[in-house]
Structures are given as structure tokens and as C-alpha cells.
Image (tube, rainbow, N blue to C red):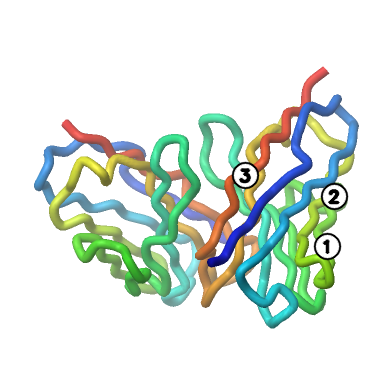
Amino acid sequence: DIQMTQSPSSLSASVGDRVTITCRASQGISNHLVWYQQKPGKVPKLLIYDASTLQSGVPSRFSGSGSGTDFTLTISSLQPEDVATYYCQNYNSVPLTFGPGTKVDIK
Amino acid sequence: EVQLVESGGGLVQPGGSLRLSCAASGFSFFSDNYMHWVRQAPGKGLVWVSRMRSDGSTISYADSVKGRFTISRDNAKNTLYLQMNSLGAEDTAVYYCAKETYWSLEYWGQGTLVTVSS
């Protein structure tokens, strides 16, 4: 099975800061990497698929990059509404494992 | 508008069984698509559980539920199911059904809580 790791596990940043979250797969998954955002008490929301394709309606301050085993999610200018936990997911092969999540809050 | 509504959660004793349902609307449930179950234990992360293709040709499970859980669907009723047997405390979680769209889980239900406790 492919294991997914994320770093950091949590971060605190100021409004307007650039935030980067890293996701690593235990073996190559091409670009089959998905990012989700889960706000407290809410259902997960699709942000990015194919490692870098922004889901319709997602603000352009979110971006993704990477291929193979190393991926990043970047928020170019952190906003208060971005407080959430962010998960990456291997979508290359079953089991479709999620990363452990990165909790983002405002400093 | 795609809607997924889970039901069937509740309190069950260790070793017991439960069947979850996910009623789908707003899309052609019988068309070529995958439906998934994902769970989230209280205060923990997301865990993929199972998926099934619309024609039943492809079914997959996480190792942690293989042999205990069975995914199925009734295309005539636009409903996805998850039969859960031999439940343990580790299965306590909110269970979400989700619809796959192009290599991602685009639509999610609100979830149904399963609590395994004596």
C-alpha cells in the first residue's frame, strides 16, 4: 500500500502570509494526487485534483504542484476563511490512502 | 444538483452489524461512475474505506475492513450501501459516501455516525 505523509502537522500563520504544505507518497503516484479542505465541523471539500488542477469555484490563491512522490499545496495569501485541516490523497492505486492532515490556523 | 444522504448509523455493540445507506440524486446513478465510502473517527483524519463501480465490476476495500464490510449498490433505487459486520471500537466514526469525478471525490454526503460501544 502507498503511504502518504504530510508536513507540517499543524501551522499558524498571519493573514496574508504565504503557506505551503507538503505531501509525500511512499512510492510514485504520477500526478494522481488530490487535495481536500475540511473546515471544523464540516464535510471535506475538493480543492485540487491531478496534483495541480484547481477545482471549479476554488479561489485562485490555492495552487498545487508536484509529481511522482513529492507534492505541495500553497495558499498564496492566507485568509481567515482558510482555517481548516488540509488532506492529500493518493488517487493512483487502491487503497486510496489519505495523508494524516495539516491543520492551519491564524496567528 | 448532486445530493448524497447517508443513513443507518447509530449505536451498536461490539461484534454487531449495521447497514449504512447513501441515497443519491441529481445525477445518473446507474451511469459509469464510482461511489466510495470514507470514514473519520472522532477528532481524527480521513480514512478511505471502499469503492464500487456502477456496474459492480470493480470493488475495493481498505485492509482494515476487508472480510468484514461489504459495499453494494441498487441502481434502481439510486442507493449505495455498506454492510458492516464484526464491528469493533476502532470502527467508531462518521461514515461519508462520496461520488468520484475524474480521479477525485467531488461530492460528499453529510455523513452518518456509527458508535461501537457496550
Distance CA(mark 2)–CA(mark 3): 15 Å
Residue type for callout 2: Gln
Of the numbered discs in the image, which one, if any, rests on residue B111? Answer: 3
Distance CA(mark 2)–CA(mark 1): 8 Å
**SS category of the residue bearing label 2:** strand
Q: Position of residue B38 (x, y in %)?
A: 63, 51
Subunit of mark 2? B
Q: Earlier in the sequence, mark 3 or mark 1?
A: 1
Q: Earlier in the sequence, mark 2 or mark 1?
A: 1
Q: Residue at x 30, y 60 (%)?
A: A72
Residue type for callout 1: Ser
Disc 2 to disc 1: CB gap under 8 Å: yes
Give the side of residue B106 with respect to residue B32, left or right: left
Q: Position of residue B90 (x, y in %)?
A: 71, 32
Q: Specify the quadrant that holds the C terminus of chain B.
A: top right
Q: As displayed, is residue B55 above or below residue A2?
A: below
Of the numbered discs in the image, which one, if any, rests on residue B83? Answer: 2
Distance CA(mark 3)–CA(mark 1): 17 Å
Disc 2 to disc 3: CB gap under 8 Å: no
Q: Residue at x 75, y 77 (%)?
A: B30
In the picture as drawn, the residue positioned furthest to the top comes out as: B118
Tell me the mark number nearer the camera, choosing from 2 and 3.
3
Of the numbered discs in the image, which one, if any, rests on residue B72? Answer: 1
Based on the displayed image, in which of its 4 quarters is residue B74 positioned? bottom right
